[in-house]
Amino acid sequence: MTRAKRSASTSPHSSRVGSRPRCERGPRDARERYVRAEVREEERDAQKLGIRGVPFFVIGDKYAVSGAQPAEVLLGAIEKAWAERNPR
């Protein structure tokens, strides 16, 4: 008679399939938590700005380009922002 393997979901160290016991967690898990927090912060910032779709570009904290625009539109916003931050 063969012994049945214990599934990941019934492991005493795991609350969900695919997770690792706390003793096996390391720098990768810390990095993932950091990245998730950064993404959530950017989502909150986008909501504050009223961004509802993608693509959406904020250039120089002043100019916004929403939707698929011709390259000339993006270039124009970049040039304006550059000129304001780097006057001659």
Image (cartoon, grey):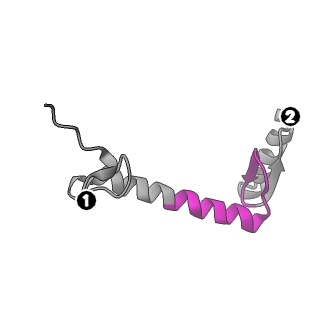
Q: Position of residue 65 (x, y in %)?
A: 82, 49
Amino acid at pointer 2: Pro
Q: Which mark is residue 7?
A: none
Query: In the drawing, does residue 40 fall left or right of residue 25?
Result: right
Residue at (72, 60) in percent of width and height: 61
Q: Position of residue 52 (x, y in %)?
A: 79, 56
Is 42 in front, or is 17? 17
Is 76 in front, or is 84? 76
Residue at (78, 60) in percent of width and height: 62
Amino acid at pointer 1: Arg
Question: Which residues fall within the magenta stretch?
Answer: 37-61
Q: Residue furthest bottom?
A: 48
Q: Which mark is residue 22?
A: 1
In the picture of the structure, the residue carrying the numbered disc 2 is 70
Q: Earlier in the sequence, mark 2 or mark 1?
A: 1
Residue at (62, 60) in percent of width and height: 42
Residue 88 in view: no
Q: Residue furthest top?
A: 1
Q: Position of residue 73 (x, y in %)?
A: 86, 40
Is 48 in front, or is 29? 29
Q: Secondary structure at mark 1?
A: helix
Q: Nearer the viewer, mark 2 or mark 1?
A: 1
Please identify the quarter of the rendering in which residue 87 is found. Answer: bottom right
Please identify the quarter of the rendering in which residue 40 is found. Answer: bottom right
Q: Secondary structure at mark 2?
A: loop
Residue at (80, 39) in percent of width and height: 75
Residue 14 in view: yes
